[in-house]
Amino acid sequence: MTEDAATPPTPEHASRTSRGEPSTFLEAIAEALFEEMIRDEAVLLLGEDIGEYGGAFKVTRGFLDRFGPDRVVDTPIAEAGFTGLAAGAAHVGLRPVVEMQFMDFISPAYDVITNYIATSRYRGAGAQPLVIRGPVGGGGRAGPFHSQNVEMAFFHTPGLNIVYPSTARDAKGLLKAAIRSDEPVIFEEHKGLYRAPFLREVLPVDDLVIPLGKARTAREGEDVTVVTYGMMVHRCLAAARSLEEEGVSVEVVDLRTLLPLDDDHIMESVRKTGRLLIVHEDTRTGGIAGEIAIRVNEQAFEWLDAPIARVTAPDAPVPYAPDLEDAFLPDEAEIARAVRYLAKY
Amino acid sequence: MAETAEQDQIMEPQEAPQVELDRYSKEELHRFLGEMLFYRRFEEKAEEAYAIGKIGGFCHLHIGQEAVALGMIGPLREDDYVITAYRDHTQGLAKGADPGAVMAELYGRDTGTSRGKGGSMHIFDVEKGFMGGHGIVGAQVPLAAGMGFAIRYREEDRVCVCFMGDAAVNQGAFHEALNMAAIWKLPVIFVVENNEYGMGTAFSRVSALPVVDRARGLGVRAHHVDAQDIVRTHAFMEDLVEEVRGGAGPQYVDARTYRFKGHSMSDPVSGTYRSTEEVESRKKEQDPIGVLRDRLMEAELLTEEELEELDKEARARAQEAADWAEEQPDPDPSELYTHVYAEENEHGRLYFDGRDREED
């Protein structure tokens, strides 16, 4: 793509890599969107306040000037309507990326996602490949409707993909893969990671695409496997570092994609350590820990030396009050306690 | 204020004008009659097959509403899009889906339009621009807006026609979609098949305003048409489609029709939510096939013999579809897991149906 005087400037935050600068998690997402829009004219963005305002979290700041209102579409506040519209456009060949201003607001679109988008291929209609992305997660004192994790509302629906990255590199590579995928993808971005200074990194200059459906080992260890994703990856890594000093070697597996789950990666680690802790920020009942536990039971039971354990948020809405919210979210101490229990078992 | 008055003027619903028969050739008029007879005979075949258990689940017949399918879809090009709700068999046929494949889908066979996975409510023929077949009231309306959005995005001159029943206009998705179609001037014609009943509830019992007035607050031009009159409906739609192709933006059509059968197969035709007298009088006065037949005979454009011949052909085509469907294979149980994702994905699950592990 040649840049001439008539082309509006590339948004600074969406082009750090090309200047050799480090990107935050949020900037990595902006880069993925920007590069995919340059690569493929069928890619467009839809969402509330994403154009003139630049998005609630400013992910798409400057995109409207660069790509125009046909490709950066400020929608009415009507999630069922614009998600359905995106599905229809995807059905006939476009590649829409829908932003939920907060992922909590996806619920009005639950019908179109689970009944229509997820089943389109099965019903003989062909794919409706679109990405629905947006901020999730607690810790920001944002209360019950702006702090949730939405994965388990969709995890049960065959036909969907759910991606939940934990690093800037993964955020960029997985989002690019999601946009190119022929599957519908729900893409969760933890708000606490968006501008976290410790996640700033210089990203590879080449086209960074990380395949969906593959977990990664965030830290190698021998004694206990901790399977987790998103913000909790970093809390688990912190716990692992402190446990190292106690002589407990912890392996941390970052799922990256929740649906489909990378069973092989999980089993390989469990077969090595014989002990499994699952950690998620989402609430407990019906959480992904239950599904992972039964799969390990099915596929690696003989290798287990201890019961499978989990650390999760309790079964409650995300509270507002700081003390309450801190108590709600799984922390390093809880994770370490659970690992110690397993290591000694 | 002047602007508001002008907008009010534009937003005043327009009635589709009556048209003279000579707008069409005799051959064309005979084709209209023959197609509607075919739709009717096709649906009667489906009804028959349902009664003896060859078709299961839900099955919504279009009998009485044939002129909507033909009149609204007939004027479209193959590359235009049609999307609809679950009373979708004849709309699929009108858009060019193969009758055998549609019937095979009703029979749940491997060669059905959705390989037996969709059934009656989910007929598709994407190559012919028939975008389904959707089982939830009103939820297809935003998808239609999306197809209109894609047309505009790629600067094509296609149009999208979106059917819905009258009850759909009370869904939130309807209002969201029409608003977006209006602000972005999308080339979508929203057609309400107004048969006066949402399943077993009269529209007027659950709506404060009539169907035709429901788009006014959304900035979409409204029309109404006697959709039991194929000549009027077809001519109206021909003109409207060309306007939309030329950039007129979204349109809203109250297509006034009537359902002669129950909502679905398990539903009585009359006696609970509508009277037998009402149904009988509508069948007598407003059968789209009867209306055209009488008009053609009066104009001496149709003889009894020609009518019989057309009906014989229609019956033969319906029979052919049913015979073909009958011979089709059932889907293999392994098909259960295909078409969920682009590539079949086992997710490493442990099953007890013999698919993955040898019995020890």
Image (cartoon, rainbow, N blue to C red):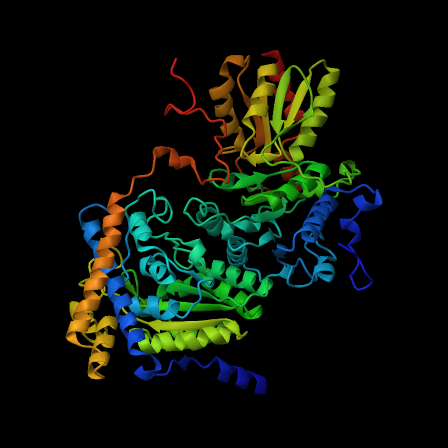
The image quarter containing residue A254 is top right
Count of residue discs: 0
Where is B188 relative to A220, above or below?
Answer: below
In the drawing, does residue A109 fall left or right of residue B317? right
In this view, which residue lies farthest toward the bottom? Answer: B2
Q: Quadrant of the N terminus of chain B?
A: bottom right
Q: Can the viewer see residue B226 in this picture?
A: yes
Residue A106 screen position, x and y as percent: 54, 50
Residue A344 screen position, x and y as percent: 61, 12
In the drawing, does residue B219 fall left or right of residue B76? right
Residue B139 screen position, x and y as percent: 44, 57
The residue that appears at 60% across and 16% down in the rendered structure is: A341
The residue that appears at 57% across and 60% down in the rendered structure is: A77
Where is A290 relative to B51, above or below?
Answer: above
The residue that appears at 75% across and 54% down in the rendered structure is: A1
Q: Can the viewer see residue B215 in this picture?
A: no
The image quarter containing residue B286 is bottom left
Q: Quadrant of the C terminus of chain B?
A: top left
Residue A39 screen position, x and y as percent: 69, 50
In the drawing, does residue B11 fall left or right of residue B101? right
The residue that appears at 22% across and 50% down in the rendered structure is: B50
The image quarter containing residue B150 is bottom right
Q: Nearer the viewer, residue B206 or A99?
A: A99
Q: Nearer the viewer, residue B33 or B233?
A: B33
